[in-house]
Image: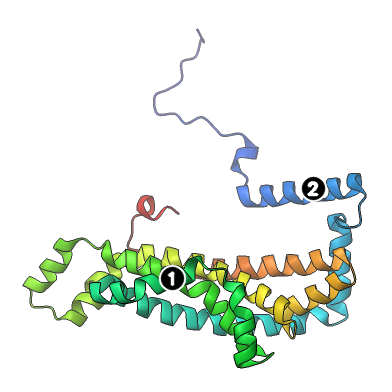
């Protein structure tokens, strides 16, 4: 038995490593593992991280990244904006009105489960080898997950909230805008976060398939030369774009749902 008893309520100090943020530690460990495996494997298709970063610096200085990145961000922004507006509108209609859900539900679920890239040749034929086709692919990837999450969120709003608003004389528009949407906001924003991740996937896949603009075009050309370092360098840029887009949506989410208790919101 220890000579000095610990005082009630006294907090044990955490080790210093436990105070460090988890994300930087995870990234550092992943980078170290990539570098080590790349050197030990000694294969051309998996170069070390240092080699990939050197290649990224080279192609950036050559002007290949910034221009392509700008094109990809335009594709992503337009595609996700269309997905967000259409997804929220259709999702709210499906969640609020059973007849709309019965009419559109089968199409929404079918298009969600179908491989989105198979529609690329159709868009290519209709819209040509340009930005419109890539934006259409982004919409196919991102919109339907937003629709389904939004519809589920609206349907999950407690009925007593709606009944109380009705008892105070609220119109249908007021019930929807002032009661149902705020109550459903956390779940809707979860769908938006999923949608933006799928939008980045649609962006790069559409650009790789159509291969006319953007980062996907750079990846396709590098893959044709079997330049693994350049492919992985562009992949790092795509990951950075995805993390930035998700971070932006999370910031908007925190602002919209700041009234939700942290234990309920999960962040």
User: Residue 240: x, y in percent?
Assistant: 68, 67
| Mark 2 nearby-residue class (10 Å; few <14, some 14–19, many ≥20) | some
Q: Determine which residue is flagged by label 2.
A: 32
In the rendered image of this protein, does residue 78 appear above or below residue 52?
A: below
User: Residue 48: x, y in percent?
Assistant: 87, 54
Q: Determine which residue is flagged by label 1.
A: 146
Which badge, 1 or 2, comes first in the chain's sequence? Answer: 2
| Mark 1 nearby-residue class (10 Å; few <14, some 14–19, many ≥20) | many
Please report the residue visible at 55 percent of the width from the left and 82 percent of the height from the top: 79
**Can residue 112 be spotted in the picture?**
yes
Look at the image and tell me in which quarter the C terminus lies: bottom left
In the rendered image of this protein, does residue 31 appear above or below residue 61?
A: above
**Gap between marks 1 and 2 measured at Cα:** 36 Å
In-image side of 184 versus 30 (left or right): left
Please report the residue visible at 53 percent of the width from the left and 76 percent of the height from the top: 140
Helix, strand or loop under label 2 = helix
**Direction top: furthest residue:** 1
Q: Colour scheme in the image?
A: rainbow
User: Residue 136: x, y in percent?
Assistant: 57, 83
| Residue 104 picture quarter | bottom left
Please report the residue visible at 53 percent of the width from the left and 79 percent of the height from the top: 139
Q: How many labels were placed on the picture?
A: 2
In-image side of 219 versus 123 (left or right): right
115 vs 4, nearest the viewer: 115
Q: Closer to the observer: label 1 or label 2? A: 1
User: Residue 262: x, y in percent?
Assistant: 38, 53
In-image side of 118 versus 182 (left or right): right
Please report the residue visible at 42 percent of the width from the left and 22 percent of the height from the top: 7
**Can residue 255 be spotted in the picture?**
no
């Amino acid at each position: 038995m220890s000579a000095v008893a610990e005082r009630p309520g006294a907090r044990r100090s955490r080790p210093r490593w436990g105070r460090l943020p988890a994300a930087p530690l995870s990234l550092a460990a992943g980078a170290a593992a990539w570098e080590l495996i790349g050197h030990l494997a000694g294969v051309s298709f998996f170069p070390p991280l240092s080699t990939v970063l050197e290649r990224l610096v080279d192609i950036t200085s050559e002007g290949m990244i910034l221009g392509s990145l700008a094109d990809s961000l335009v594709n992503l922004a337009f595609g996700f904006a269309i997905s967000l507006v259409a997804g929220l509108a259709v999702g709210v209609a499906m969640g609020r009105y059973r007849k709309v859900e019965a009419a559109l539900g089968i199409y929404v679920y079918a298009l969600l489960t179908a491989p989105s890239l198979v529609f690329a040749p159709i868009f290519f034929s209709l819209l040509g080898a340009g930005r419109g086709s890539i934006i259409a692919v982004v919409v196919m990837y991102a919109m339907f997950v937003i629709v389904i999450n939004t519809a589920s969120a609206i349907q999950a709003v407690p009925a007593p909230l709606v009944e109380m608003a009705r008892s105070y004389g609220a119109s249908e528009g007021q019930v929807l805008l002032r009661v149902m949407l705020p109550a459903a906001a956390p779940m809707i924003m979860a769908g938006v976060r999923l949608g933006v991740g799928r939008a980045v996937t649609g962006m790069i896949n559409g650009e790789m398939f159509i291969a006319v603009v953007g980062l996907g075009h750079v990846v396709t050309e590098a893959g044709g030369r079997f330049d693994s370092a350049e492919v992985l360098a562009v992949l790092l840029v795509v990951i950075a774009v995805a993390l930035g887009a998700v971070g932006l949506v999370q910031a908007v989410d925190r602002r919209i749902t700041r009234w939700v208790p942290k234990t309920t919101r999960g962040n």
